[in-house]
């Protein structure tokens, strides 16, 4: 009953999560190249729409890069923490961007108008917010494990002897 469980970091190898991050990156790319216009945001304020597309583009790229970089950090607690913090901050801003667009869609067109668009935009925003909560939980668990000294170190089982 007093047996400790291994601390588990959510893996960045989840194809579904990486796919959502790619979609989150694709939307502002389309907006920057003017294949998509966030008209609901433009109706509120044109500068808001312009800022939205660039902030979303940059932070979505950072979040995706951090997720992919996590593969290189596996096994090094400090690098994993740093990578998660970068992903968490960028993903938080991505969540705000999508939730802002969702609110703008509801303000400009009414709740339930274009329900698929509103559902997808809200889904991206709330999923990103959920990932931020997951990152905060994992960082808290890791910090708690460090404080009580329950962090395992791994060593190679068969290292050659230097003679």
Image (cartoon, rainbow, N blue to C red):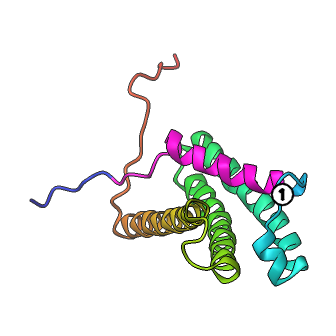
Q: Which residue is mark 1?
A: 31
Which is nearer the eye, 146 or 98?
A: 98
Give the residue displayed 46% in from the left and 23% down from the top.
Answer: 159
Look at the image and say whether residue 101 sits in the magenta stretch: no
Q: Position of residue 138 (x, y in %)?
A: 44, 63
In-image side of 96 versus 111 (left or right): right
- On screen, residue 144 versus residue 108, left or right, reads left
Please name whichever residue, 131 or 44, is drawn nearer the observer in this view of the structure. Answer: 44
* Residue sitting at the far top: 163
- Determine the secondary structure under disc 1: helix
At 34% from the left edge and 68% from the top edge, which residue is drawn? Answer: 148
User: Looking at the rendering, which quadrant does residue 5 occupy?
Assistant: bottom left
Q: Is residue 46 visible?
A: yes
Q: Is residue 70 visible?
A: no
Q: Nearer the viewer, residue 138 or 36?
A: 36
What's the magenta region? 7-31
Give the number of callouts: 1
Which residue is drawn at the image coordinates 89% and 77% (left, top)? 46
């Amino acid at each position: 009953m007093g047996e400790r469980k291994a601390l588990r970091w959510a893996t960045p190898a989840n194809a579904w999560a990486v796919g959502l991050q790619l979609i989150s990156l694709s939307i502002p790319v389309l907006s920057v190249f003017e294949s998509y216009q966030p008209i609901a945001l433009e109706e509120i304020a044109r500068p808001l729409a312009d800022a939205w597309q660039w902030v979303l583009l940059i932070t979505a790229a950072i979040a995706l890069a951090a997720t992919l970089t996590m593969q290189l950090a596996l096994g090094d607690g400090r690098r994993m923490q740093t990578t998660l913090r970068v992903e968490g901050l960028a993903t938080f801003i991505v969540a705000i961007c999508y939730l802002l667009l969702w609110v703008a869609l509801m303000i400009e067109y009414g709740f339930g108008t274009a329900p698929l668009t509103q559902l997808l935009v809200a889904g991206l925003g709330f999923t990103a917010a959920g990932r931020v909560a997951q990152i905060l939980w994992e960082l808290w668990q890791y910090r708690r494990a460090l404080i009580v000294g329950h962090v395992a170190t791994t060593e190679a089982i068969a290292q050659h002897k230097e003679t």
